[in-house]
Image (tube, rainbow, N blue to C red):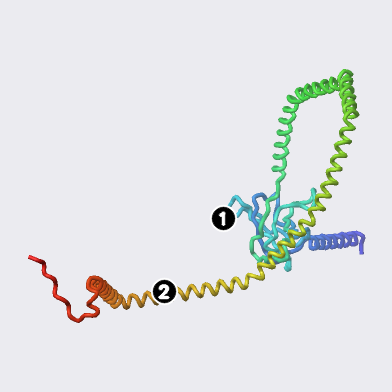
Amino acid sequence: MSTEAKVGAFVIAALVVLGAAVYFVRTTQTVRGQVPYKTYLRYAGGLAPGAAVLFGGIKVGQVSAVQPASHDPTRIEILFEVKTGTPINRNSTARVGSVSVMSSPALSITTGSNEARRLQPGEVVPSEEAVSLEEITRRIGTVADSAGALMEQLQKDIPELTGEARTFLANLNEISGPRNQKQIERILAELNTLLNRESPKIAQITDQLSELTRHADSVVQSVEPVVGNVDRAVTNVNTTLDAIREPLARDLTELERTIQEARTLLVSIQDVVRTNEGDIAGTMRNLRVTSENVRALSESLKQRPWTLIRTTQPADRRVPQ
């Protein structure tokens, strides 16, 4: 075989090996999805079809399409596929991120919770908006503007604060000057003299307080028997009340029964009186007539007592003409 043929065969073999290596590397780095899902974002952040899908930082699939949503063009619809068995659940959230600063954007999905319901193929994964670089730049600009305004305000306030600080230091120097120091020393000396002069009185007051405390202790000790006697008296009263409570309750019950019987008797007497009211009235009339007759008889006997022994009555005397 000629040298040219050998070189050609070597080149072809090298190309075949290079193609196989590229294919192997691509199939190793790319995970072909089998379960489709979708999510919606306001900002895609440069996400493109073929971008990696990360579940808890693990590559589980790739993005299949990035396009405005048909029902709401202000939202970006992201279609992606993950391998079978990826536990995407209701608490999982999707957002645009990247593994490192220099890497391409990727779709990151959080693991959610084990108790949440697993999403079915084709369902929407809840999303969380990521802060874009433009938003970060805008916020930095706002902070810079605020810092500039703060610096201007400080430039205006610092001289005033410096003047107040100088005044305070001057007042402090004046307070701590030699004249004030001498006055403070004099006040302290007078205070020491006062304490030395009043120390006996203070000691006497302290002794009196101690004596009063001892007397108070003795009073408390003398009061303790009185308290014990009061406790015993209260106990005796309670015992007496407990002893007479049952007989007293019995007597009250008997008295109540007697009163009830008397009330019943009175009701019966009232019924008898109402029933015999006519007879009683007749009897009272007869008694009244009888009493009148007895009175007339007694009057007649007073005037003519002989009627008790004579059967005939003498003729009435005539009045002389």
* Residue drawn at the location 86% of the way across and 43% of the way down: 211
Label 1 to label 2: alpha-carbon separation: 100 Å
- Residue 195: percent from the left, percent from the top? 88, 29
- Residue 14: percent from the left, percent from the top? 87, 60
Q: Which amino acid does label 2 sit on?
A: Leu
Number of marks drawn: 2
Q: Mark 2 points at which residue?
A: 266
Nearer-the-camera pick, 215 or 300: 300
* Residue drawn at the location 74% of the way across and 52% of the way down: 97
Q: Could you say which quadrant of the image residue 288 lies in?
A: bottom left
Label 1 neighbourhood size at 10 Å, few (<14), some (14-19), many (20+)?
Answer: few
Label 2 neighbourhood size at 10 Å, few (<14), some (14-19), many (20+)?
Answer: few
Seen in the picture, residue 70 relative to 175 is either above or below; the reply is: below
Q: Could you say which quadrant of the image residue 231 lies in?
A: bottom right
Q: Which SS class for mark 2?
A: helix
Tell me the quarter of the image containing the N terminus.
bottom right
Q: Residue 71 has which mark?
A: 1
Left/right of residue 63 with respect to residue 283 in the rendered view: right
Tag in front: 1 or 2? 2
- Residue 299: percent from the left, percent from the top? 24, 71
Q: Residue furthest front?
A: 320
Q: Residue 294 has which mark?
A: none
Q: Which residue lies furthest to the left in this view?
A: 321
Nearer-the-camera pick, 142 or 294: 294
**Residue 82 visible to an observer of this rendering:** no
Q: Which SS class for mark 1?
A: loop
Left/right of residue 4 with respect to residue 68 in the rendered view: right
Tell me the quarter of the image containing the C terminus.
bottom left
Contact between labelled residues 2 and 1, with CB atoms less than 8 Å apart: no
Seen in the picture, residue 281 relative to 198 is either above or below; the reply is: below
- Residue 45: percent from the left, percent from the top? 70, 49
**Residue 269 visible to an observer of this rendering:** yes
